[in-house]
Image: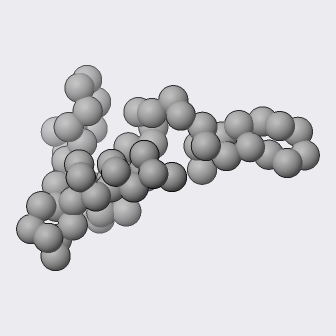
Amino acid sequence: DAFYAHLAEEHVGRKSHGNLSLNCMWMGCSHGDRPFSKRDHIVSHCRAHVPFKANVCQDCGAQFKW
């Protein structure tokens, strides 16, 4: 959770802080040339680039990002 908070606050930013960026700047991202329409969309998209799986199913032990 701290890692995603870092991505959201430092790399995506916030409109109220004057540092909002709706473009994905991840190297090689095919979506990089098209801005997202909402902040939560790009924050969610950033998870696709990170192999970190923070959540574990209590029943089967499978790991997942969301």
Above or below, 25 relative to 22: above
Q: Residue at x 85, y 48 (%)?
A: 58
Return the residue found at the far left.
18
In the figure, is residue 40 to the left or right of 48? left
Nearer to us in this view, 16 or 1: 1
**Residue 51 drawn at (x, y percent):** 51, 29
Q: Residue at x 38, y 43 (%)?
A: 46
Above or below, 14 relative to 66: below
Q: Quadrant of residue 40?
A: bottom left
Above or below, 15 relative to 40: below
Colour setup of the view = one colour
Return the residue found at the far bottom.
16
Return the residue found at the far front.
2
Q: Residue at x 33, y 55 (%)?
A: 8
In the figure, is residue 12 to the left or right of 18? right
Nearer to us in this view, 27 or 18: 18
In the figure, is residue 39 to the left or right of 62? left
Q: Quadrant of residue 63?
A: top right
Q: Is residue 43 visible?
A: no
Return the residue found at the far top.
28
**Residue 11 drawn at (x, y percent):** 23, 48
**Residue 34 drawn at (x, y percent):** 19, 45
Nearer to us in this view, 48 or 13: 13
Q: Is residue 18 visible?
A: yes
Total marks drawn?
0
Q: Residue at x 12, y 61 (%)?
A: 19
